[in-house]
């Protein structure tokens, strides 16, 4: 389910309101490229910076624009009740799946995290993707908890953080994880630099920030991996190494991909919710130059 | 300004709504004990789990109940616009001060953090407490940034994280920090185990979770330190070491103090916003036993 490339959309802002016109452009570009699914309101979609009402509106627009493409909606929130509300809304308007990471200001313990997934899985009949993002949430799933949550109803996929490992280690890790999970639960990979390697190692889906702005290039990597051209997929990804370096330099892909979208005029600058700032001045010029050199347009 | 004990209030929930009746009891206990100020909607007040409207309501109730005690309102939010809205509301209803920590799902950089404080300091005429909480926000202030922010209008206090250092090191650190700040900007200490030592070392204010539930005991420690009985203040704090140990065991003071308030029937269990869970079963019984042994009631 949701295999291949799932493109994470930015949620462009205009004076601290959702810039609906440009958000539609972001979505239309993904529909034009025919990515395999669209993931909205993830980390890249600035979900944590939007109100519950804004998130409902973003969901509505995504489902409207996506045509036949499946839309996966990020429903993470500090409090369980908001997560439940967002999940119910996503189902009501026709989303194809839900994505949930255990974000919390107070670091959660294992019982609290399981309780959260249990509450959602029991309440809403929609495929649910479990999303481990220790860098943002300060919570790291144990394999045992992955397995316990994977046995809940509707859980369809575990999205794991990128693995900076060798090919052999990646294969071993994915094989080990799959052995713990019911056979209908797939694995997804996140962290753009690790997408190609993750697909090669047996993940079904690459959830990609890069793919939200540059869907054609991300699809080329994805299709290569899916068709067994493992070396070509990794080589293609490695040509983008200067982009991945900027992710590190600026603390994540969000600021870099938002700036790239501004350079492409896919969104209007400043597009990030305050206090976040995209790249500016020389940093932005350097990125524009890099996009041109890499023929990313 | 706001010197002495600033007691952090819990925000008790009842079926995921604010439990106003018990929240008023929490406030009345602090008024009865005559703490020096009341800090609402901090980490302890579960601010991150409440909607903007709920936070306005909590602010209104606190100002109503506080009588002549100054109320400091936590205005931290993911997006700057919400922070601005909450600050304006707090001023409008008569709060005495604001507290702001740079919380953000995407880790902020120094420019973004300064931009956030600048936006608030320029917009709202109310004393502003700068609150560094690296454990929760994953952002650590440099001394240079403290100094730069302290020069903004209305900034009155820098609240620093607890310092697990020797007395000499504490004194040296506080002296070093004070030298960087304008003389009207004071220092506050957080982290209950380090309150007495922080006051002894020259901090003006102890912002205390413990003081929100046990104001008389926290005041005794505070007054001892303020009157120069440094050894007695630390000794009193050390008698509470079993409580501080539970903070570590359960990942922060929030779950422990919420459970203590439930045991005292100051609030009704379960009082924390889901997915957070207070202590239960044997853990709760052990805490009840400990409170009894320590004569905390």
Image (cartoon, coloured by chain):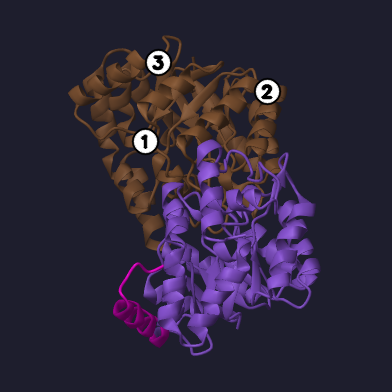
Chain colours: A brown, B purple
Provide residue B93's location: percent of width, then percent of height: 79, 69
The correct choice, above or below, for A21 with respect to A2 in the image is below
Mark yes or no: residue B147 visible: no
> Of callouts 2 and 1, which one flags the residue occurring earlier in the amino acid sequence?
2
Q: Quadrant of residue A88?
A: top right
Residue tagged 2: A91
Residue tagged 1: A191
Cβ–Cβ under 8 Å for marks 2 and 1:
no
Provide residue B170's location: percent of width, then percent of height: 35, 77
Cβ–Cβ under 8 Å for marks 3 and 2:
no
Residue at 27% x, 13% y: name it.
A228
Judge by depth and name the residue closer to the eye, A250 or A147. A147
Q: Main secondary structure of the magenta part?
A: helix
Mark 2 crowdedness (10 Å alpha carbons): few <14, some 14-19, many ≥20: some
Residue tagged 3: A181
> Of callouts 1 and 3, which one flags the residue occurring earlier in the amino acid sequence?
3
Q: Quadrant of residue A238?
A: top left
Q: CA distance from mark 1 to mark 3?
A: 22 Å
Region of the chain picked out in magenta, as a range: B162-179
């Amino acid at each position: 389910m949701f295999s291949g490339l799932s493109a994470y959309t930015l949620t462009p802002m205009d004076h601290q309101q959702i810039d609906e016109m440009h958000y539609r452009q972001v979505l239309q570009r993904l529909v034009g490229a025919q990515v395999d699914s669209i993931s909205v309101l993830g980390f890249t979609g600035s979900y944590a910076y939007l109100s519950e009402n804004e998130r409902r509106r973003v969901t509505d627009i995504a489902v409207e624009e996506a045509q036949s493409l499946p839309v996966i909606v990020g429903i993470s929130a500090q409090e369980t009740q908001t997560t439940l509300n967002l999940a119910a809304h996503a189902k009501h308007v026709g989303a194809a799946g839900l994505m949930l990471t255990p974000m919390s200001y107070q670091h959660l313990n294992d019982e609290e995290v399981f309780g959260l997934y249990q509450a959602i899985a029991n309440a809403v009949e929609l495929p649910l993707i479990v999303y481990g993002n220790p860098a943002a949430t300060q919570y790291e799933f144990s394999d045992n908890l992955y397995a316990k949550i994977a046995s809940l109803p509707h859980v369809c996929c575990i999205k794991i953080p990128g693995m900076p490992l060798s090919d052999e280690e990646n294969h071993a890790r994915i094989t080990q994880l799959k052995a713990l999970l019911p056979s209908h639960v797939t694995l997804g990979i996140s962290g753009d630099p690790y997408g190609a390697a993750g697909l090669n190692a047996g993940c079904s889906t690459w959830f990609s920030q890069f793919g939200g702005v540059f869907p054609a290039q991300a699809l080329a990597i994805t299709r290569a991996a899916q068709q067994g051209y493992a070396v070509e997929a990794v080589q293609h990804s490695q040509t983008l190494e200067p982009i991945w370096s900027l992710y590190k330099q600026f603390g994540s892909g969000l600021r870099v991909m938002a700036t790239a979208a501004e350079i492409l005029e896919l969104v209007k600058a400043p597009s990030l919710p305050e206090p976040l700032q995209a790249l500016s001045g020389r940093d932005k010029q350097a990125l524009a130059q890099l996009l041109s050199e890499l023929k990313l347009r």
